[in-house]
Amino acid sequence: MGNITFTMIKPEAVEAGYTGAILSRIESEGFRIVAMKKVHLTPERAGNFYAIHKERPFYNELVEYMSGGPIIAAILEKDNAVADFRLLIGATNPAEAEEGTIRAEFAESLSKNAVHGSDSDENAIIEADFHFSHAERF
Ligand code: GDP
């Protein structure tokens, strides 16, 4: 346990052509790509993924945004993957993200913040299972 996390490169970052640069950064920081795909979530799938935020005022906006274009979904492996990946991506609001973090470099705004990273080992497993079967992991 503790060795996988789940990430998404969000629609605006894919659209902007940052996929390669972000994946390069992720690999160079020592994360191994276990599974990866490009997928366009339906509003229903995006809503289910973010069900934990259902009561938040920005939920509808978040669902619309995350289903507004294709994303890259991936499972990443590394010791201490969840915490190390949260450090690599930086604060949710890119204005508060430390220099050198992925969000500081690539995010547009608090809502359009380039990447997702799981916030616990438990959620990493739930999120990985949401997007990938075990036959898709290598
Ligand atoms: P994360 O774990 O750093 O992604 O942050 P959260 O779990 O708190 O929020 C999930 C996602 O919802 C964020 O990555 C943002 O894309 C979006 N989000 C968070 N706060 C806001 C907000 O105040 N307004 C809007 N529109 N989106 C937000």
Image: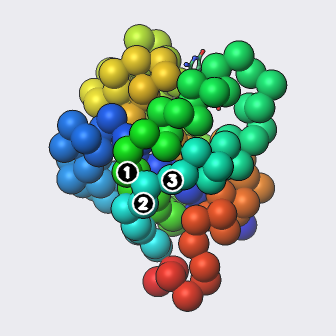
Q: Amino acid at mark 3?
A: Leu
Task: Say if disc 3 is inside 8 Å of ligand 1.
Answer: no
Q: Residue at x 48, y 33 (%)?
A: 65
* Helix, strand or loop at mark 2: strand
Residue placed farthest to the top in the image? Answer: 95
Instruction: Check disc 3 and report the residue beneath it.
Output: 41
Let me know if residue 109 appears in the view. Answer: yes
Q: CA distance from mark 1 to mark 2?
A: 5 Å
Q: Please determine whether, in this image, residue 49 is positioned above or below residue 136.
A: above
For mark 3, give the secondary structure: loop
Label 2 sits on residue = 39
- Looking at the picture, does residue 118 appear above or below residue 77? above
On the picture, is 126 further left or further right than 68? right
Along the viewing direction, whichever of 32 and 113 lies nearer the viewer: 113
Instruction: State the residue position of label 1.
Output: 70
Q: Is residue 87 visible?
A: no
User: The disc labelled 1 sits on which kind of residue?
Assistant: Pro
What's the residue at 19%, 43% (across, down)? Answer: 17
Residue 74: image location, x then y, percent = 46, 61
Kind of residue at badge 2: Val
